[in-house]
């Protein structure tokens, strides 16, 4: 096994590399003041918003948020992993990539050098081999064959089997107490400490089909397990760990990009088997959220890869509520040139069962014929909530729609949707523009934010996937639900008039009040940001040891960053970003 690339070599390589040369060898750049500009290669646009700074040796797209150094650009543009990108840059610079012998560096970096990655990889291989050869594998094999899956698809998604029993994985990987602690940290073992004198540790996944979850580099970061017997829950996911954050990851995204490097649309579905069943029948552009609602972080990530996202949900009440949450999460990412569509399946069907029953071509035809553009779905749903045939209904519709439309960053789409709202309500564009600030002020003075408001916005930070570092974010608990808009109780149900309004007021859809973004940032993250902009401040810190006791990933990073800067005050911000 090849040794690690020394950090000193990576620092030297970045010092010798001109990012303008690297980027201009792949796209056409135009000089613009001190910087260079171009249309972004990571999303479709007509007006250049992609900027390359020779002074900072950094690139950034003001349209989609893509940013990073020369290594990050090559990784995303050429679809290379970190090692391949280093080798490509070294080849350009006429340098040979050295390797360290004898294992890990003395000062391990977190979390990219965490032993958790090695344990998760070993666990994945254990589960994969168990599916091939364990005496109890028959139920798992029969289940997968019954779902129509081939051996090729099982291999592509590294499907596995967790045998029945309480300590199969613990015996295989957890030889000593330190190894078992790492297995607990990785979410592979569960520790029951109800009785301090007799702590019990056991395998988290038992008698389940295993679905490895990979990050953008293809590293295993977590697992999902589907029960084979009658145990509950039916699906079980890994808990949050230093390398796994449910609200950011998407199952199947790595596999979709491996299958097709030039995707133009990604389909968001609800489950592991939906993703795999679609892939089995040739639709290899599906991803699934991991037991959470579709978030703004998910959408930022998807729109950096493709210009179009298709949401595919069940047609029942739960599916429609999930679709509306997805729409709300999508609005802040809708730059001009991006689009989102919504496809609702017949009740009782999901992509897995439907694509197997009607076939690939029929399913594609269903998408083409029935998928609704976001704007159409937006107005259809709100018009079902607020009947625009009455003055009161028009006023209510404008109150609901205007603040949501105001979240759209794309000028052209925002203007067109305001025009459509004007056509429906008769309110002028000026009146609608004034409603959004009023709604924001009202939301600030209300009893509290709506559930889900506490998603931190890291859109301005270069994606950690550019560097050999897994993302890490603090967890925020949602507050208890607060009162939102309610239906008018004194109003009668609608009546069908001339067939124009064919549906009655629905009980399965209640748009929430406009949500107010709440900025929540840990002091350690603030300190990290400040140090990256002003590395010289590290020399003013006399003792960093009191940070080390903090149970916070940012605090650990802060300690490491301060230590590195105090040892080498000449390190530049880009070198620090590449290191961490």
Image: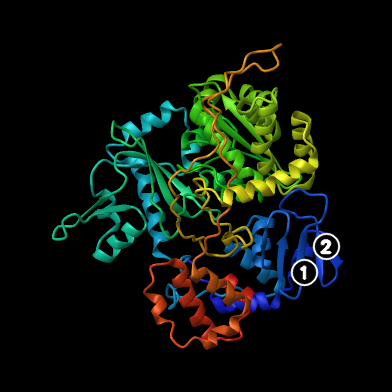
Q: Are marks 2 and 1 in contact (CB under 8 Å)?
A: yes
* Badge number at residue 332: none
Q: Nearer the viewer, residue 393 or 155?
A: 393
Residue neighbourhood size for the residue with mark 2, other residues' Cα within 10 Å, grouped as few (<14), some (14–19), many (≥20): many
Asked if residue 278 can be seen in this view, the reply is: yes
Q: Relative to 50, is 508 above or below?
A: above
Q: Secondary structure at mark 2?
A: loop
* 325 versus 564 height, above or below: above
Q: Give the image quarter of residue 536.
A: bottom right
Query: Residue 10 vs residue 180: left or right?
Result: right
The residue lying toward the viewer, choosing from 426 and 528, is 426
Residue at 56 percent of width and 38 percent of height? 512
Local secondary structure at mark 1: helix
Q: Give the label on residue 29, or none.
A: 2
Q: CA distance from mark 2 to mark 1?
A: 8 Å
Residue 279 sits in quarter: top right
Name which quarter of the figure residue 422 lies in: top right
Image coords of residue 396 (percent x, y): 65, 33
What is the x, y in percent for residue 33? 85, 70
Q: Is residue 304 left or right of residue 475?
A: right
Q: Which residue is situated farthest in the left direction here?
A: 197
Quadrant assignment for the C terminus: bottom right
Residue farthest along the front direction in this orientation: 490
Q: Which mark is residue 20?
A: 1
Mark yes or no: residue 580 visible: no
């Amino acid at each position: 096994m090849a040794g690690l690339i020394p950090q000193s070599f990576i620092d030297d390589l970045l010092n010798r590399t001109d990012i303008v040369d690297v980027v201009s060898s792949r796209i056409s750049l135009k000089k613009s003041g001190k910087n260079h500009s171009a249309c972004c290669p990571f999303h479709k646009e007509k007006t250049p918003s992609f900027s390359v700074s020779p002074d900072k040796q950094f690139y950034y797209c003001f349209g989609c948020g893509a940013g990073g150094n020369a290594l990050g650009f090559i990784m995303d543009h050429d679809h290379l992993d970190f090692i391949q990108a280093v080798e490509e840059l070294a080849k350009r610079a006429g340098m040979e990539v050295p390797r360290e012998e004898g294992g890990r560096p003395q000062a391990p970096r977190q979390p990219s050098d965490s032993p958790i990655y090695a344990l998760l990889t070993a666990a994945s291989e254990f589960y994969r081999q168990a599916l091939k050869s364990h005496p109890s594998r028959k139920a798992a094999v029969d289940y997968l064959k019954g779902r129509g899956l081939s051996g090729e698809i099982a291999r592509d998604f590294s499907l596995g089997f967790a045998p029945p029993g309480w300590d199969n994985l613990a015996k295989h990987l957890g030889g000593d107490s330190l190894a078992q602690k790492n297995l607990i940290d990785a979410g592979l073992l569960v520790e029951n400490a109800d009785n301090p004198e007799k702590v019990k540790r056991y395998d988290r996944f038992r008698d389940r089909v295993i679905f490895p979850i990979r990050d953008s580099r293809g590293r295993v970061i977590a697992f999902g397990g589907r029960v084979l017997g009658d145990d509950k829950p039916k699906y079980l996911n890994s808990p949050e760990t230093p390398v796994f954050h449910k609200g950011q990851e998407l199952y199947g995204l790595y596999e979709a990009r491996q299958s097709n490097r030039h995707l133009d649309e990604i389909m968001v579905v609800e489950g592991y088997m939906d993703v795999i069943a679609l892939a089995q029948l040739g639709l290899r552009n599906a991803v699934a959220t991991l037991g959470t609602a579709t978030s703004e972080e998910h959408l930022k990530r998807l729109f950096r890869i493709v210009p179009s996202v298709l949401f595919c949900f069940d047609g029942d009440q739960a599916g429609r509520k999930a679709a509306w949450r997805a729409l709300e999460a999508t609005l802040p990412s809708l730059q001009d040139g991006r689009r989102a569509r919504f496809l609702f399946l017949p009740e009782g069907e999901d992509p897995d069962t439907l694509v197997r029953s009607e076939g690939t071509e029929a399913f594609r035809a269903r998408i083409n014929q029935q998928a609704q553009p976001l704007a159409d779905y937006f107005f259809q749903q709100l018009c079902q909530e607020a009947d625009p045939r009455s003055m009161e209904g028009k006023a209510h519709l404008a109150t609901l729609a205007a603040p949501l439309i105001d979240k759209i960053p794309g000028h052209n789409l925002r203007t067109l949707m305001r025009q459509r709202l004007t056509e429906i309500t008769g309110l002028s564009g000026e009146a609608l523009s004034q409603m959004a600030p009023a709604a924001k002020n009202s939301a600030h003075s209300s009893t509290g934010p709506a559930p889900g408001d506490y998603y931190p916005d890291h859109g301005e930070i270069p994606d950690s996937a550019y560097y050999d570092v897994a993302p890490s974010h603090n967890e925020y608990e949602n507050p208890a639900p607060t009162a939102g808009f309610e239906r008018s109780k004194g109003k009668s149900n609608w009546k069908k008039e001339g067939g124009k309004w064919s549906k009655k007021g629905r009980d399965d859809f209640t748009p929430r009040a406009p949500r107010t973004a709440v900025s929540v940032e840990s002091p350690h993250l603030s300190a990290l940001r400040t140090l990256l902009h002003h590395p010289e401040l590290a020399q003013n810190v006399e003792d960093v040891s009191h940070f080390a006791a903090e149970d916070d990933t940012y605090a650990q990073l802060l300690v490491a960053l301060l230590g590195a800067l105090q040892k080498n005050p000449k390190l530049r911000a880009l070198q620090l970003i590449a290191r961490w």
